[in-house]
Amino acid sequence: MIVQVSNLKKHYKKQPVLKGIDITIESPQIIALVGPNGAGKTTLMNCMTNLLPFNEGSVELVGKKNTDASIFYEVSYLQDNRILYGDLTGYDHLKFICHVQKIPLSHIKEVTDRVGMTGYMKKRVRNYSLGMKQHLLLAMSIINKPKLLLLDEPLNGLDPTSAINMRNILLELYEEGTTIILSSHNLDEIDRLTNIIYFMKDGALLKESLQDFSSNQYFVNVDDPLKATTVLKQAGISCTMIEGVISFLEIEVILQNFLDIMKANGITITSIETKKIGAERRYQELFAKEKTDETVAI
Amino acid sequence: MKLLLFEFKKIFFSKRFLYIMLLLIIGIALLFARNVTFQSYIEKEEKEQIANQTKASQANSRVHRIALENSPEDEEQLKLQKMNSEIRDQLYELNGIASSDDWQRKLTLQNEIFANTLVYKNEGGDFPLSEKEIHTSTTLNEKLLKEGIAPEHDIYSVAMPNFMKQIVDLYIHFGAFVLLILVIGESMSGEYENHSINQLFTQPLKKTWIVTSKFWSSVLLYVIMTGTVLLSAGLIGLLFGEKGTFNYPMLIEKNNAIEFITISSYMTKGILLVSVAILMVITLYFLYSLLFKQTLATLAVVLLTLAGGYFLSNFVTWGPFSWFNPFANLLPGDMILQQNDQMWYQAIPITLATSIVLYILAAWKINTSKIV
């Protein structure tokens, strides 16, 4: 068993923060924790790693109780960059982890090359940018090749290249057998990483497979957008046009039907782009209504 | 051991520690520069003292003359006048050799003046020197003459051992505590405030090790700080000061009698006592850090506790109380110089025992500690 969280309940004073969370993970997978700010994502991870106490329930990670510090030989937790020491270098941080976890120091070069921070690992952390700190945090989290990797907002402060690099590293780790639980607000990246999303809402967990919600949105450029709009309307096809680009959802319009209509009316398609929108769509379904209700109430 | 090095590096490589060490060295150099500047003042001060005593003697002379004009046969007044004249002549002579390097002659003459003054006072004469002052000064002069050691000014000496003693005095009287608190001020509570403790809590470490390594790294930093203080003072004194001797005598009171210890003995005992007190302050600081998890609150409570202990030590003067007072070593100078009904090392066991108890409490506390 990699993760066994049973009926985890936590409250601050009388305010419930986690309302009986259950998570069971038996084989390696990538799980995204998604929810608005204050939904309890970080609290859940902190409780799982014994940084915060909880009121009810139990947590076992890699087959051991979460109060057993030895779990951190196999579990890593990427937290926010406040955990770094500004007066020390990135190398000092990694060396410390190697010493504590009995990892050969030769792994440092290996991991910094992988993350792309070898060039500045001997600089003091106080001189690092946000992205550089994020690289260091990632290097610190993966240097022990963990069985379970928890990541709290790992994409914060990363430029597109670094974000792609991080995504690739996470996918590689997953292929190597690491279970990854990450929280993020970047729904596009989540779509690219995993189909398994745990939506957190008011301290409760809604586990969903995006395979049920995963969908493509098409963006089509044609030689005569006005004519295209007219014929699509006549055919009763629902789509939108923004700056000459026609867009529609895979679940609402069958692509082949669209292509047939275009061909029949002599409209030439110049390009088609596809975007996966499962996480975002489901997120909007779950949380947008609430936001609208709140707005109405205001 | 690895955690200890990590903890040590966190503070040792911080800008704050660097600045504190630099300021410490600059402060010591400035104090030496002040002593050098005030060298001419020493002779001036000496002459002023002689002048004051001479004036007192001249005033006494007038009093005796008037008394004798009224009753010329008053034998007591005649005797006092004669003794006063002798003192005055000796003061004139002392004033004459004040600028000379013949310190043995000066000390001998001073002691003769003290002896005559004591007799004069015993015979009913008045002189602005107390018997205690006369006794201690005479004893010290005799000791210096016997040992063949030239006298040094208490405050403005540029002799290396005496200058070091001056610095050690400042260091053991609150200097070490203030510097230590500045250096390790955020060592534990800052980790909670910055959330960096999370990094340690998510490593396969026993939480007790965190307290242990922080404790020993603080001790190591204190040793470095003390070494820096002693080395800087010694080096500056050696390069720019006079040779002097570490056997320079210091007066202490032991069971209401005057005894001597050497400067080196005073410094060794002083540093030993303050080091024992520092162990207690470190453990006290860690325990409060874990209770409050906030630097300012922790510092305030540590300072309040130490101030309370300081006033308790000052308030209760009963000698045996030191056996039970862990704060007695906050005043190491008093413990060494005033050994009436107590020994200088008397409070060491209770201070060490208190440190161990505080350490155990801190180790227990961190085991149940969560992030804020």
Image: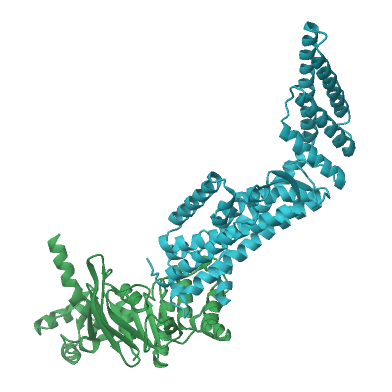
Chain colours: A green, B cyan
Q: Is residue B309 left or right of residue A39?
A: right
Residue A292 location in percent, x, y?
Answer: 15, 67
Residue lying furthest top: B70
Task: State the count of labels.
Answer: 0
Q: Residue at x 37, y 81 (%)?
A: A66
Q: Nearer the viewer, residue B32 or A37?
A: B32
Q: Nearer the viewer, residue A249 or B160?
A: B160
Residue A290 location in percent, x, y?
Answer: 17, 70
Q: Nearer the viewer, residue B243 or B51?
A: B51
Q: Quadrant of the N terminus of chain A?
A: bottom left
Above/below status of A123 relative to A236: above
Residue A147 location in percent, x, y?
Answer: 41, 88
Q: Nearer the viewer, residue A43 or B324?
A: B324
Q: Is residue A157 left or right of residue A14?
A: right
Above/below status of B267 relative to B107: below
Residue A198 location in percent, x, y?
Answer: 26, 81
Above/below status of B369 relative to B333: below
Q: Quadrant of residue B3?
A: bottom right
Q: Is residue B283 left or right of residue A14?
A: right
Is residue A139 visible in the rendered image? The answer is: yes
Q: Quadrant of the C terminus of chain A?
A: bottom left
Q: Residue at x 40, y 69 (%)?
A: B369
Above/below status of B131 relative to A124: above
Is residue A81 visible in the rendered image? The answer is: no
